[in-house]
Amino acid sequence: MKRRVLIVSPYFYPEGGGLEKYAFNMALELSEKNEVTVLCMTRGEEGWEDLGGIRVYRVKPGFIVSNTPLSLRFVLKTAGMVRRADLVIAHTPVPFAADVASFLAKLRGIPIRIVYHTVGLKKGAGFLDALAGLYSATLERLTLRGVGIIAVSKTVWEYLRENGYNPRVSHPQISLPEHASRQRSCSREKVILFVGQLGRYHRFKNLYLLVRAFSELSVEFPEWKLWVVGDGDLLDEYRRLALELGLGSRVRFFGRINNPEELAEIYSRSGVLVLPSSFESFGMVVAEALAFGVPVIVSPHVGARILVEPGKNGFVLRDLSVSSLVDALKLVMDDPKLLRKLSSRSTLRGHR
């Protein structure tokens, strides 16, 4: 008889970003030998669906605070589903969903694992950071007490160890492996690629820094373009910035892309991926880009920098500044031979 596994996540693929992709890949892997059900919240339509053989229940939140969905109905739904589970896996540190799952699983005596995705909740938001600190010192400690903890990167593992926990590491798997074979058949274009959420709670991904760096190089390299994949409430702000800098059609905003074939096509045509985040527990887009033979330029604060071999498959910025990003971009934009060399060596090393 198959084990019944319940995965609890604040949101779930195709909504969200890296956390949700990780949860989806974990669910797919577990579904090969287990009966997997996912419970999450959604900004879209409430209901259930079959997603690759996984039964997914999506609950509409009552309200959302700082990107954290809250719902009494979600609590009641979790209570019913936990009762029928043999194992519960909850994804955090987005508050509420994992806290509810942990409390109810412990109450029922059901084993629970917590997958931890980032180095804390503070993002330079003043009052909200104060609340995040209070949460980490109180409710989160109760949630993580007595459970198995999985860190998604060495950076997250170190953070948790420093805070008195004993996690193990399980790096994300790439989301588009079946499409990566096209990387050798598609011709590369002079394109700088950014993939990430564009919401106000994701300013730390520093897209504005990349747009400004591209602006400084746009006259010297008129054939190059910047492609942005992602959506959020700051999309219009980034579009205005591109127009103000005179970039016009040089910056293309694709919006959110849920179709794996379409996203694979974009990776395959791009020249280099840039992720200049102020902090990033891992950065699955880096692993995805390398799987498609796309060199990467990342900040020193990106967990997936462990995949980058400077000068072989990409570069790690010396610091987070426009000048540092300009220097790194100029290396690949000014040297087609180097770019081809980086691309040919951009393969994803085993890292699980």
Image: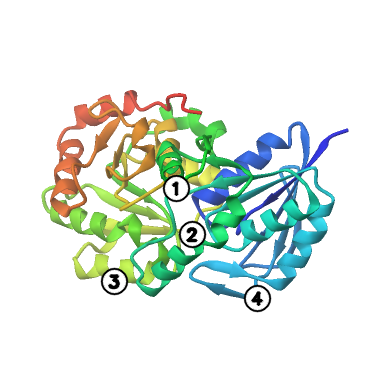
Q: Marks 2 and 1: CB-CB under 8 Å?
A: yes
Instruction: State which mark lies toward you, 1 or 4.
Output: 1
Residue occupying the point 33% across, 23% down? 345
Q: Residue at x 20, y 28 (%)?
A: 338
Residue located beneath label 2 in the image:
136
Element class at badge 1: loop
Q: Which residue is mark 1?
A: 163
The residue beneath circle 3 is: 240
Name which of mark 2 and mark 1 comes first in the sequence. Answer: 2
The amino acid beneath tag 3 is: Arg
Secondary structure state at the residue bearing disc 3: helix
Q: Of the residues tagged 3 and 1, which is closer to the observer?
A: 1
Label 1 is placed on what type of residue?
Asn
Q: Earlier in the sequence, mark 3 or mark 1?
A: 1
| Quadrant of residue 22 within the rendered picture | top right
Give yes or no for contact between labels 3 and 1 (Cβ–Cβ under 8 Å): no
The secondary element bearing badge 2 is classed as: helix
Image quadrant in which you'd find residue 197: bottom left
**Which residue has dot 4 on it?**
62
